[in-house]
Image: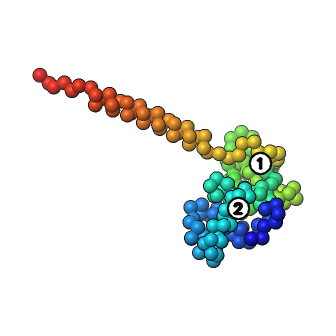
């Protein structure tokens, strides 16, 4: 494996593994090795190294973009001509640095999360956005540090707790109804 001492250099096979995992997070190691034309043990060991190095998170399926060189994160608010909204969204989809696009209320029409390798790369992405037909103006805010990364565990945990409590209530009600003596009609 062509890793440097700091484990930040990925070779083409590592990048292909990451791309396949992004495209199909449920892909099995055997399928992955077959589609890439590498041995199953090679795929497995590379995935382990990617997880150990922090490039892959969340059970080996979520890529840490900072670890692969995209350490500049910006949030771009766009004001657009509404009749051009679909075209703007289509154009944003073709800009690789644009990770997410949300239609928003308040100031602006769209909110985009954009990543870049450096400020020059960010400027290139922002110029592409500004050249898009229908974009009137943009405002960019840079993220200096992520204190709470994207997460879903607290919400799912809350649902599990609520379902457990509801299930316990149902079980208690069912227990009470089966323990109650049944009166026969006179």
Residue in view at x 64 percent, y 76 percent: 38
Q: Position of residue 92 (x, y in %)?
A: 72, 58
Please tell me whether mark 2 sits on a helix, a strand or a loop: helix
Picture layout, residue 60 above or below residue 158: below
Please tell me the numbered disc located at residue 75. 1
Picture layout, residue 60 above or below residue 172: below
Q: Quadrant of residue 133?
A: bottom right
Left/right placement of residue 172 relative to residue 1 reads left
Q: Quadrant of the N terminus?
A: bottom right
Q: Quadrant of residue 40?
A: bottom right
Report the number of discs. 2
Residue carrying label 2 = 50
Residue in view at x 14 percent, y 24 percent: 185
Picture layout, residue 43 above or below residue 124: below
Q: Are marks 1 and 2 in contact (CB under 8 Å)?
A: no
Q: Quadrant of the C terminus?
A: top left
Closer to the camera, 119 or 34?
Answer: 34
User: Is residue 176 visible to the viewer in this orientation of the structure?
Assistant: yes
């Amino acid at each position: 494996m062509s890793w440097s001492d700091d484990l930040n250099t990925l070779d083409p096979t590592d990048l292909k593994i990451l791309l396949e995992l992004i495209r199909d997070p449920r892909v099995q190691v055997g399928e992955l090795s077959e589609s890439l034309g590498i041995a199953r043990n090679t795929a497995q060991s590379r995935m382990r190294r990617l997880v150990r190095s922090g490039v892959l998170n969340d059970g080996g399926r979520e890529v840490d973009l900072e670890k692969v060189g995209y350490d500049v994160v910006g949030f771009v608010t766009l004001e657009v001509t509404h009749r051009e909204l679909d075209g703007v969204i289509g154009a944003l989809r073709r800009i690789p640095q644009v990770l997410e696009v949300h239609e928003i209320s308040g100031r602006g029409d769209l909110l985009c999360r954009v990543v870049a390798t450096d400020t020059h790369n960010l400027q290139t992405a922002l110029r592409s956005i500004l050249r898009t037909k229908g974009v009137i103006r943009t405002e960019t805010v840079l993220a200096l540090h992520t204190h709470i990364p994207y997460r879903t565990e607290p919400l799912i945990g809350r649902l599990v707790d609520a379902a457990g409590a509801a299930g316990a209530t149902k079980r208690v009600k069912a227990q009470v109804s089966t323990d109650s003596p049944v009166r026969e009609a006179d």
